[in-house]
Amino acid sequence: MLDIKFIRENKEIVQAGAKKKKIEVDIGKLIALDDLRLKELKELENLRAEINRVSNDIARDQDPALKIQLIEEMRSVKEEIKSKEEKFKKIMDDWQKMMLQVPNVPDMSVPEGVSENDNKELRTWGEKPTFSFEPKDHIEIMNKLGMLDLERGVKAHGFRGYFLKNDGALLSWAIWNYAQDFFLKKNFTPFIAPAIVNKEHFLGTGHLPGGAEDIFQTQDGQYLAGTAEVPMMAYHAGEILKEEELPKRYLAFSACFRREAGAHSKDVKGLIRVHEFYKLEQLIICKASHEESVKFHEELNRNTEEFIESLGIPYRQVAICTGDLKGAHVKSYDTELWVPKEGKYREIASASYYHDFQTRRFGTRYKDSEGKILYTHSLNATAIPTPRILVSLVENFQQADGSVKIPEVLRKYMGDQEFIGKK
């Protein structure tokens, strides 16, 4: 959520930012509503002050007749207050709904565009493998090697269900264990985060109201998080931190749940888009500094790239354009892995920063060296998700005999095994 003071002082910039993100919001209407909110609030405060003043007069006055007169006068004032409170509540509800619709202002470095087709490739890494045979997709490879069972997954879960088994399960554990060792060397504090989270925290991160169709909801009104970002942002909700505590650097592991209801997943089979998966997430809470946010954003993104490079999987870095940028984001990168059978890159991770957009909603603040209370900035980035990474891993390292070569950095987590499927 943007500061209403910032919106009022920079209405043209905020309106232009929304236009770039292809989000419809009327900043002029919001400011007019805010004027009304402030007017009604002032009138309410004046009436309450009058009640307090007269109450003091009643307590001091010794004339019983005057006391009765003042009490009668205050009854009508209290009725007026009650009426105005109801009106103010309706205005506040409308104001809060409009405030939630106002997107964050994209950074000047974000490329202009309408959709994901306009995202800008910044660089590529690694050599795409060449095969002396017709490469198979991950479903065929993993089925033949006994690593995956989609048929029974559907029987147990329904559409998009899966079982990882044998070396499929062991390879996932190897990735988690290696990722833990790799990322904890980057000075993160490890967490295992809850996946069932209260609704207000999805509003806080910006996943609601816009992303409702992609979120699973429980019968008692809670929601299943699609990323540990949501519970980790809730971790410091309502707190005032000390400046010397910052930055907070967290590495959180959690189960994740997404409905994958959008059109983007209609043509995707196998393990690329599933309802239930696991993810390690990087999250930083830092001082209210644009320079720090930019620095940490690049660092988090680079951490993920280094991890992918250590596995030897070709990838590309993409800057998300304005039309594809989410409402809460100031700037975002995607890391996309090469999928040989499809002949295209597929997203594996994203890194984003928000300034104080999220922390205003969560009430996460800190006291600086001068005693001033400021909202922190927040950032997050995928460390690595499973099982999606298995798609590129098994396809890029498939061998002519049907086996899969295990990346060297993972072998110690799989009993020094060099291949899956080759004795």
Image (cartoon, rainbow, N blue to C red):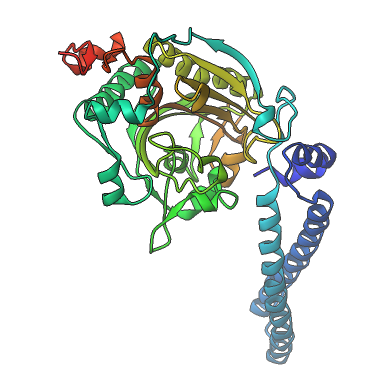
Q: Which residue shows up at 54% across the image and 43% down it?
A: 205
* 256 or 269, nearer to the observer: 269
Describe residue 112's horizontal placement relative to residue 143 as left or right: right
Q: Is residue 183 left or right of residue 403?
A: right
Residue visible at 31% across and 25% down in the picture: 141
Q: Tell whether 305 sits left or right of 121.
A: left
| Quadrant (top left/top right/bottom left/bottom right) for the C terminus | top left
Q: Position of residue 370 (x, y in %)?
A: 62, 28
Question: In the rendered image, is residue 206 in sight?
Answer: no
Label tally: 0
Position of residue 170 relative to residue 86, above or below, is above
Of residues 312 and 25, the one nearer the viewer is: 312
Q: Residue at x 79, y 59 (%)?
A: 33
Instruction: Residue 99 in the image: state x and y as whole percent.
Output: 69, 51
Residue 415, percent from left and from top: 16, 15
Q: Quadrant of residue 184?
A: top left
Q: Nearer the viewer, residue 353 or 342?
A: 342
Query: On the image, which quarter does residue 402 sit in?
Result: top left
Q: Answer whether residue 192 is visible to the viewer in this image.
A: yes
